[in-house]
Image: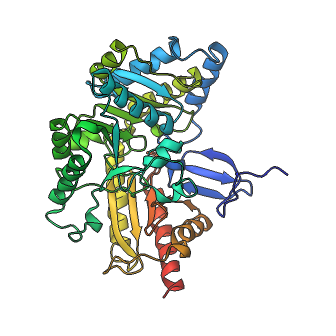
Amino acid sequence: MIKWPYLPQDLGLEIVKSEGAYLYTKEGFKILDAAGGAIVNNIGYGREEVADAIKKTALNNTYVLPPFLTPEREELLDELRNHWLPPHLTRIHLSSGGSEANESAIKMAIQYQASRGEPKKNIILTRSLSYHGTTLNMTGISGHAARKRGLENYVPVAKTIETPYPLRCPLGSFHPDAKDYYLKNLKEVISHHGAENIAALLMEPVNGSSGGAIYPPEGYWKEAQDILISNDILLIADEVMTGFGRTGYKFSCEDYEIKPDIMIAGKGMSSGYAAISGTYSTDKIAESIMNAGYLVMFHTFAALPLSCTASSAVLKILRRENLCEKVNPLGKKLKQKLIAELGHHPLVAEIRGKGLLIGVEIVKDKDKLLSFDENERITDQILSKGLEEGVLLYPGGTGEYRDIICLGPPYIIGNDEIDLIVSVLKKTLNYIQAKYA
């Protein structure tokens, strides 16, 4: 018998239908998707408008070579340029997923440096806690230990700066000098490797699930970009998870008033209705690469007309229904209720995040920030218990010593869904507390 998935999982389910913010199992059990899948879905499941658009495109352009222009591609490019992308990011390279898009971003950064006579500038800095994809290169340079296991002797070794982590800052939790501490680390790493050897810093403006919605100290990213500019180092912003409204902004870089040289966004770009992501850069970078005679190669299924159509339809729904404008009020309500119900829970170290990307960090000892033993698999237990109660939560962390629960529901949830999420999460934490008391 053929088995699915490749490696059996404890949380395996057979989902036969998804509609709105809910999933339905083969047995007829209704589950609130508080994870938005893999923090992907923003407009809700089962939208006929998107399905109809995909059907129309399937009858018109099933497959066309990625460099050719089609009506479906042109419609998406217009949507992105006119309504979504920062004005300085004028070049668009489409891929099937975030891993491919991040690979493209790195290739662009290194080719750009080479094109301007700086071939030695080929180091890509990443961060100690981070996640940028599942390809071998992205696995190696991401700060996600669990996904490197068994690959350590093959994947590249990451050159990292510390991820600003206010809760666990070495100076002390929420230390007033945390920003300066992490900026000093950035300067030291640049000095150690030599600015003349560094092409770019690849970062998530807000940590996704690897960190669990970690926000840096106020002012960090603005000053960090100034440091990068002074050292002739590009800033690459990975907004695969945070883009298209997830944190209450079109892109979370807006929250910090920074201008990445290259930006990656996916997931919510099509709300899970099709596989698509984008790598966006400036004219300066693209023209330099072109003038040097280098290629920016496409993937076979990049810019698939079906995917472009799905993305256009999703982005238009987001605008027409003002869904992005609803993210911050919904997220604020959810976070406030979580803090009110769970903020003083002995297992909750922090409830953090903005918009509808929220992380709840679970610890064994709140005062000492002591985590549960990894072998206890606390996050997995919480997810399993949540499913029993009818809510799909999302696992965070890097597989080492932290237990993180992430929330990333569709933007269409209401008060009933917020109440259910908080109620079920509280039940799961009380279950863990009683079990390990």
**Does residue 169 appear to the left or right of 124 in the view shown?**
left
Seen at 48% across and 38% down, the residue is 98
**Does residue 410 appear to the left or right of 345 in the view shown?**
right
Residue 125 seen from this side: yes
Q: Nearer the viewer, residue 40 or 98?
A: 98
Residue 100 image offset from top left, x and y in percent: 50, 34
**Does residue 23 appear to the left or right of 403 in the view shown?**
right
Which residue is most to the right? 1
**Vertical arrangement, residue 284 with respect to residue 391, above or below:** above
Q: Total of numbered circles in the picture?
A: 0
Residue 269 seen from this side: no
**Vertical arrangement, residue 38 with respect to residue 79, above or below:** below
Q: Say how the picture is coloured.
A: rainbow
Q: Quadrant of residue 350?
A: bottom left
Residue 298 image offset from top left, x and y in percent: 51, 22
**Vertical arrangement, residue 136 with respect to residue 402, above or below:** above
Residue 257 image offset from top left, x and y in percent: 20, 39
Q: Nearer the viewer, residue 309 or 94?
A: 94
Seen at 64% across and 62% down, the residue is 11
Which residue is most to the front? 120
Seen at 27% across and 57% down, the residue is 164
Q: Nearer the viewer, residue 161 or 330?
A: 161
Q: Quadrant of residue 26?
A: bottom right
**Vertical arrangement, residue 232 with respect to residue 256, above or below:** above
Residue 419 image offset from top left, x and y in percent: 45, 63
Which residue is most to the bottom? 437
**Does residue 201 appear to the left or right of 35 in the view shown?**
left
